[in-house]
Image (cartoon, helix red, strand yellow):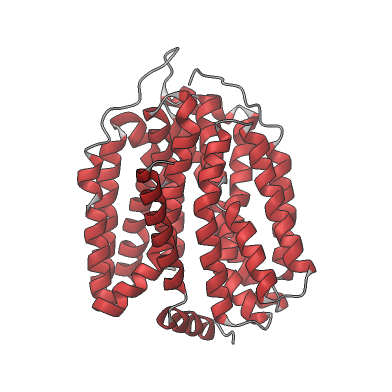
Amino acid sequence: MAFAIQNLVWGLSAVLMGGVADKWGAGRTVAISALFYAAGLIGTRYAGSEAALYFSAGLLVGLGQAGLTFAVLLPVVARAVPVEKRGVAMGVASAGGSMGQFIVVPAGQVLIDTFDWSGALWVLSVLMLLALPLATRLRGRPVQTGTHQSLSSAISQAVRHPSFHFLFWSYSVCGFHTAFITLHLPAYVVDGGLKASDGAIAIALIGLFNVFGSFWAGKLGGIYSKKTLLAGLYVTRSAAIVLLLALPLSPAVLYAFSVVMGLVWLGTVPLTTALVGHIYGMRYAATLSGIVFLGHQLGSFAGVWLGGKVYVSTGSYDVVWWLSLGLGLAAAALSLPIRERALVPA
Amino acid sequence: MTLRRVIVSAALAAVLALAFMGYLRPELMLNWDALMALCGFG
């Protein structure tokens, strides 16, 4: 329940944190968020009741994540470099975030083995506080470019533009896929007769290849049409799911699926964020990316919830896999009509 | 390729390989097994 709250708070407050970053600068947003995150980790250590756990691991960590993850940071990275280098810069930033996600699981296990879970939470909270001195390097606020535009008119312009809705709903499919697969793939694997360790290796392979996939998605997005690449990523996900369902489940099939899925895992993030900045301008890119990210989190919630619900009802994940396949194709179909033309000067 | 780039690439590969091996450690596998058992699988 604490993690469900965390994900919901993360999605809802990404809009708020994006607004704070656009108004007062990313440095302050990162610093405040790091404090929330560290307080949440320490609070989790001392939580003596369910309510305290929901507050610390759910609310505080969720607020921290909102200001420290892609929706806020990628627009900052994009603003900091010339237009022609944005693709590579966002690819590097996405790959860095992906690498952190990949490393934190075994690193957390080592910390737990060494310091016990309570010491591990302390170490992680101290690591989080290292973001404070780093945040001082993120100076300045977004500069106004072109015509003057208020935040409310930027949001109003975006929500009246069909492409914003295409981005929102295709990103929700990304959330659906990643959450469903992360949480339910290991169970699906065991249910299919493989070992739990095969599920662990599958998740590790997805994490490993995601580092390269997210970098290349960002880089290629600076050269080729971002919406076409985005559509390609979603079609590839669907193709990987077809292979997983069509072939008899074996470690080789599972690992091949994981490698392909890893290559297209979070490549959607730099492409979607870059499209938001490209179409609606960089001035309010963090806020608008935060709104689109809310779609991602709604999809995540649906993926986790539906995966469990359908398994309990039918005794199998097949329905959700077929749904994931269809949603991947739908997300590709939503990506292609996006009008990749700047409404506001970047 | 410059020497600096070679060193950085080698360091990156080492970190990624170490992290991947970390997923294969018995302690982590034990946690996966425990998690699956808690969820009623295996």
Residue beneath the point at 59% across and 84% down: B41
Quarter residue A171 falls in: top right
Asked whether residue A272 appears in the rendered view, the answer is: no
Of the 4 image quadrants, the one containing the N terminus of chain A is bottom left
Q: Position of residue A269 (x, y in %)?
A: 52, 44
Q: Position of residue A257 (x, y in %)?
A: 66, 64
Q: Position of residue A325 (x, y in %)?
A: 73, 57
Taking A222 as reference, is A126 left or right?
Answer: left
Quarter residue A101 falls in: bottom left
Q: Is residue A199 above or below residue A135?
A: below
Instruction: Please state the total of marks drawn on the protein image.
Output: 0
Residue sitting nearer the eye, A260 or B33: A260
Residue sitting nearer the eye, A133 or A215: A215
Residue beneath the point at 70% across and 51% down: A236
Q: Is residue B11 above or below residue A22?
A: below
Give the residue at the far top of this rendering.
A147
Asked whether residue A81 appears in the rendered view, the answer is: yes
Q: Is residue B26 above or below residue A86?
A: below
Q: Position of residue A69 (x, y in %)?
A: 40, 47
Give the residue at the far right of this rendering.
A246
Residue beneath the point at 52% across and 74% down: A200
